[in-house]
Image (cartoon, rainbow, N blue to C red):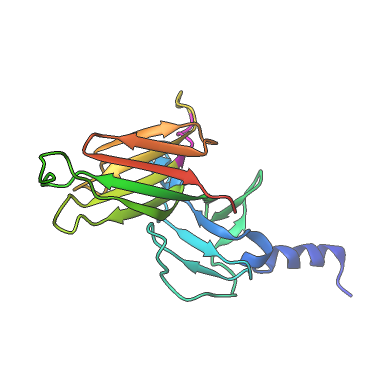
Amino acid sequence: MLRPIALIAFAFAAPVTAQSALPPGIWTNNEDVYFAEEEGREKAEWVALEVNDAGQWRGVDAFGEAQGEWSSAAIPGLTPREGGGWQIGESELRLSRPMSCWVSVRKFAGKPDGSTDWTFANKLEIFDQGGRVTVPGEGIAPDVTIRVRNVTWAAGSRNKPSLVLYVHKDDPVRAESYSWASPDASLVGVNLRWVQASCSRVDT
């Protein structure tokens, strides 16, 4: 029979599986990575994990595309975070919330009557912890990528947490512009006159 101390040691040594730890959804360390250098911490590699209802997990990229097969094994480096939550190494993971977006981009050429013509794409799935969606212009309009973050600012910042929608055109890092709303807002949108976009929370 194991002594209590041995049981405690075994519990801490046991691997943490996605099923026993992470609720279903997409988890990322986006905000931890974003502000690491500003807070004087070592910057971790960007990580995104998708966990399904069966407790299996796989890596995904910022566009939500799978980067491997589903696994039932323990997530490497996953441990409980002091004060609650989860981390990989020392990089905090956050559960994203899914959103559905539409994007409309002004075409290079107007309509025959001279009025402005627009593309329109809807039902675009994205997640709010650094997720991205690209809308190809297919030669008739600029290619546009939107990105969503639920931002908690660096320690010491006077900025308030915000749900932020970014619009990218030619630069995947620096946005053309962005808009923001309350972090618990059900919708965030932007209108730059040449592109309009809106993202709404999806109930799960």
Q: In this view, does 163 lie above or below 73?
A: above
Magenta residues: mostly which secondary structure? loop
Residue 57 locus on image (x, y percent) = 54, 68
Left or right for 19, reference 175: right
Q: How many numbered marks does the figure carry? A: 0
Left or right for 159, reference 143: right
Give the residues drawn in magenta, as a range. Answer: 150-155
Query: For the N terminus, which image quadrant?
Result: bottom right
Which residue lies at the image location 29% right of the left edge and 42% below the top edge?
A: 167
The residue sitting at the front extreme is 113
Q: In this view, does 9 lie above or below 144?
A: below
Q: Is residue 100 above or below residue 3?
A: above
Residue 58 locus on image (x, y percent) = 50, 69
Of the pair 116 and 100, the residue shown nearer to us: 116
Of the pair 3 and 61, the residue shown nearer to us: 61
Which residue lies at the image location 46% right of the left edge and 47% below the top edge?
A: 128
The image quadrant that residue 191 belongs to is top left
Q: Does the magenta stretch include residue 119?
A: no
The residue sitting at the top extreme is 158
Residue 124 locus on image (x, y percent) = 39, 55
